[in-house]
Image (cartoon, grey):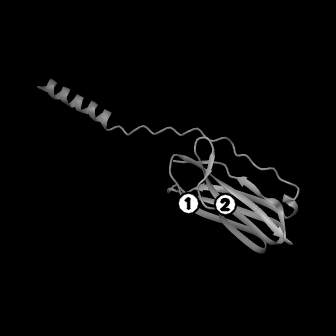
Amino acid sequence: MYMKRFLCTALCLVFLFIVARPPAASPTPPPPPPAEQSEIGILSTKYLADWNCSLINNDDGTVTIKGYSQANRIVDEIYVEIYLQKWNGSSWQTVSNGYRKTANNNVYVSHSKNISVQTGVYYRTLSYHQIIHNDIEYPKQPQKIVSDSCYID
């Protein structure tokens, strides 16, 4: 009788151990290649002194994309335009509208946006920076930069 009870209890425990185990976590996909940055032209630095962008994982199903542009003196117009990009396994896809902020007669502009994202994917911020002063664009093509990628789990 004790042997039957012991055997039944042991089988139940083994069954519970097998069935009640949490599922194995899915492996993190390989990271995308390092970000490519555009070269800085000589006119980029005539008025555009500093620029950058970043991505913050808010750990709540959203990310914050940020960017700023800074001039070395007061300019007629300065802007930053930010986008969210998603890695599809072979290339970066832009998955948000462009969020642009412009400042007039200023030296600095920054912008940020919270965006809902799916988990299990790498994201990054893409940004463009430019100054317009005396009706001339500096640099002629907006300066492009991307943030480091971030895996959202």
Looking at the rendered structure, the secondary structure element under dot 2 is: strand
Q: Mark 2 Cα within 10 Å, few/some/many (few <14, many 20+)?
A: many
- Residue 90 in the image: above or below residue 119: above
Please name the residue shown 73% across and 46% down the image.
36
Q: In the rendered structure, which amino acid carries the disc numbered 2?
A: Ile
Label 1 secondary element: strand
Q: Position of residue 126 (x, y in %)?
A: 67, 55
Residue at the extreme bottom of the image, as rendered: 105
Pointers 2 and 1 in contact (CB under 8 A)? no
Mark 1 sits on what residue? 115
To which residue does mark 2 refer? 82
Q: Is residue 127 left or right of residue 153?
A: right
Q: Nearer the viewer, residue 126 or 8?
A: 126
Q: What residue is drawn where x is 74% and y is 67%?
A: 79
Work out which quarter of the rendered image holds the N terminus and state it. top left
When asked about the image quadrant of residue 2, the answer is top left
